[in-house]
Amino acid sequence: MGMLRGFGVDIGGSGIKGGLVDLEAGALDGERLRIDTPQPSTPDSVADVVAKIVEKFDWKGPIGVTLPCVVKRGVAHTAANVDHGWIGTDAAGLFAERLGRAPEDILVLNDADAAGIAEMRFGSGVDRDGLVVLLTFGTGIGSALFLDGKLVPNTEFGHLEVDGHDAEKRAAASVKEDKGLTWAEWAPRVSRYVSVLENLIWPDLVIAGGGVSKKAEKWLPLLDVRTEVVAAALKNDAGIVGAAVAAARQSAH
Ligand code: BGC
């Protein structure tokens, strides 16, 4: 029997990455392809790049695509860190048309939700029940909430108000970068943010994801919060893997 495969595309503010996924191992099957996100990141220009990536692979099956947006039934509803033209766009319909696929072959979901699906199935959330929240620290802050392993989609905890500010404007990894903060300077911002969140939802586990999860040993030990915080295991590929898993699940139904 051949290996179970899927395909995922992860659309971010700076790069669009895609590749074949081994759905049993929860890992990329071969190389991934990355192309810079076009600026402005309008739906049409992004769809062109997605098509370019998918065409490089010999893949006819279902495709999962992430967006840094609230996505309900394939339609994007927010656009905090991408072109505002996404708001109200039928993203699933757009990608299906551009890729020449049937609508049911395309699944579009929030980027953090996709990363969370991958972490719960293959990474740091395996066998963790109760309330688990994955937070992705990148350009913004993404969130994915799971109750006993089941996703509650589109939570948008990155936009909690913290001390009168949009949380991601204070504690995203991009803020560390832009302000040239050290880990010791950035970590209290993350602690303050996680404290506000934990007072509202009392999670059993926080999984810290995003690019900075690769350097988890530099900042997780500096956090001063009530909840257990662990680093994401899948690092940069979580979005691609989770998108492929979600698309395969949809097409199986
Ligand atoms: C968006 C979320 C997204 C997160 C990470 C936030 O600004 O509102 O939808 O998951 O950034 O990209």
Image (cartoon, rainbow, N blue to C red):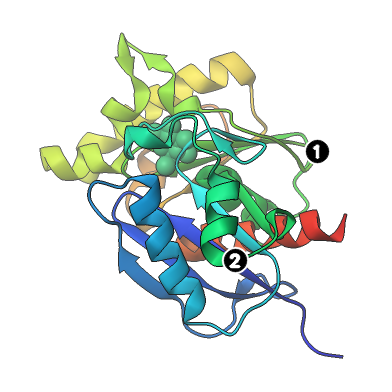
Nearer to the camera, 127 or 93: 93
Question: Which quadrant of the frame does ligand 1 lie within?
Answer: top left
Nearer to the camera, 88 or 66: 88
Name the spot of residue 34 as percent of width and height, x first. Answer: 36, 71
In screen coordinates, is 211 left or right of 206? Answer: left
Name the spot of residue 42 as percent of width and height, x first. Answer: 33, 45
Q: Considering only vertical position in the picture, is 222 above or below 12?
A: above
Q: Considering only vertical position in the picture, is 175 above or below 15?
A: above
* Image quadrant containing the C terminus: bottom right
In screen coordinates, is 27 left or right of 151? Answer: left
Instruction: Find residue 5 and report its image quarter.
Output: bottom right
Helix, strand or loop at label 2? It is: loop
Q: Which residue is mark 1?
A: 148
**Residue 249 seen in this snapshot:** yes
* Image quadrant containing the N terminus: bottom right
Q: Amino acid at mark 2?
A: Gly
Name the spot of residue 207 as percent of width and height, x first. Answer: 55, 45
Name the spot of residue 191 as percent of width and height, x first. Answer: 39, 29
Nearer to the camera, 3 or 69: 69
Instruction: Find residue 121 and report its image quarter.
Output: bottom right
Residue at 47% x, 37% y is 69
Q: Which residue is mark 2?
A: 100
Residue occupying the far bottom of the picture: 1
In screen coordinates, is 205 left or right of 2? Answer: left
Residue at 78% x, 52% y is 127
